[in-house]
Image: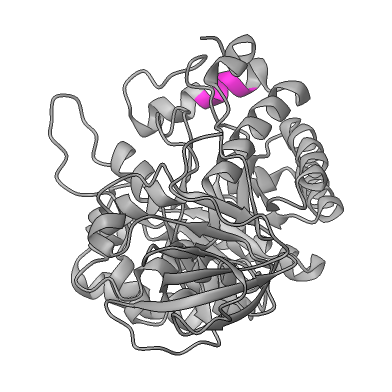
Amino acid sequence: MTYSFISPPNAGRFVLSNATLPAVAVVGFDAPAVEGLVKADIVITDGVIAAIRPAGAAPADYARTDLKDGMVWPCFADIHTHLDKGHIWPRQANPDGSFMGALDAVRADREANWSAADVKRRMEFSLRSAYAHGTSLIRTHLDSLAPQHRISFEVFSEIRDAWKDRIALQAVALFPLDAMADGIFFADLVTTIRQTGGLLGGVTRMGPELVWQLDTLFRTAAEHGLDIDLHVDETDDRGAETLKAIAEAVLRNGFEGKVTAGHCCSLARQDEDTAARTVDLVAKAGIAVISLPMCNMYLQDRYPGRTPRWRGVTLFKELAAAGVATAVASDNTRDPFYAYGDLDPVEVFREAVRILHLDHPLDTAARVVTTSPAAIVGRPDKGRIAAGDPADLVLFSARRWSEFLSRPQSDRVVLRRGKVIDRSLPDYRELDNVVGG
């Protein structure tokens, strides 16, 4: 096992005493907060959080671990990933780090290599990493052009069942919306999604067919009771306004399901008035927005020999201020769209704080990888600390924000139903016979 800073009691009933909790992720407990952090004792009985009490107030006769003000977070929610693409970098790298380079590289690798066995091996490797880091909820997009949609959704269904007690999994069909013009393919895709309990997704692009595409998408989703999660305006082109078109389509069609939009990069390139009008429409339409700070920093504004001029991310603070549900997520992992990453929400959070300026103050920042993403995907029972919930917790030696954000927290302890899990990460060598070394 990896080195951990403490060893909680292996007991049916114990206390995590003198803990520091992010108040935004705690339900049913009030205490004075400093920078959004509160002190508490957490009583755990038979794998469940029995009570959250003021620091020092838990029964003295219980077995205990004194955290000495170390932080305790709920397990994380990572709601925009690409488990089907993960770890293909050694086999199919992005030749120049550009968005088009990523598209071409993934297409070539998918067509040549994405058998059921290949997808399964890489998905399971990614999930083992995410689990070791403390994640309990993941939504993944699955490339869904024929025949890949049948292959990947079948693999996903098998893995979702195998992992149901460790990570709750959701899947979204990712495809170019112009593919809906092929009625036979689109009908089969919808059938596949319904059979596997997935979501409709897609990539939106400006064009003369956009209104028809969105109306068709929303009508289909409404007819079949499906939610929607889209890739939106992942570009630095100021003229890309499909986010606005999506909001208008939600309102025009009276769509009542959940709608999520990922990326929305071009919003930050537009003039203030144009962007503000779109933000207002997004709020009115009830669309949630997911920012992918690490991937967007990697891909956006990349031109040969030129230093990037902007951060690549959406107007996160403006959207949140308007009442839009917002969160951040990992996105791609060691594939042509992002060469790095390990599905570690602590890394995502640390980078998001820097890139999106989620600090000054940090009072509610922890929500972006805990309560907010869990609520967006319809699992408000995840990403929180509450009496009566499973003791799925992540323990840190860091006592305050400056400590938490200054190190990768490699010595964290992850509890699932009150028991310490093995945090050993899978060795990349395990994939050598799949993607090369």
| Camera-nearest residue between 162 and 304 | 162
Whether 109 is among the magenta residues is yes
Farthest residue, direction front: 61
Total count of labels: 0
Q: Residue at x 55, y 80 (%)?
A: 251
Q: Residue at x 53, y 20 (%)?
A: 428
Res. 234 visible in picture: no
Please provide percent x and percent y for residue 106: 53, 26
Above/below status of 108 relative to 6: above
Question: Taking 108 as reference, is 37 left or right?
Answer: left
| Camera-nearest residue between 307 and 62 | 62
| Camera-nearest residue between 138 and 405 | 405
Q: Looking at the rendering, which quadrant does residue 48 occupy? A: bottom right
Please provide percent x and percent y for residue 425: 55, 32
**Which region shows up in magenta?**
106-110
Q: Looking at the rendering, which quadrant does residue 264 occupy? A: bottom left
Q: Residue at x 45, y 78 (%)?
A: 40
Please provide percent x and percent y for residue 246: 50, 66
Whether 357 is among the magenta residues is no
Q: Looking at the rendering, which quadrant does residue 380 occupy? A: bottom right
Quarter of the picture holding the N terminus? top right
Res. 195 visible in picture: yes
Dominant SS of magenta comes to helix
| Camera-nearest residue between 77 and 49 | 49
Question: Taking 38 as reference, is 420 left or right?
Answer: right
Q: Residue at x 52, y 65 (%)?
A: 373
The image's colour scheme reads one colour
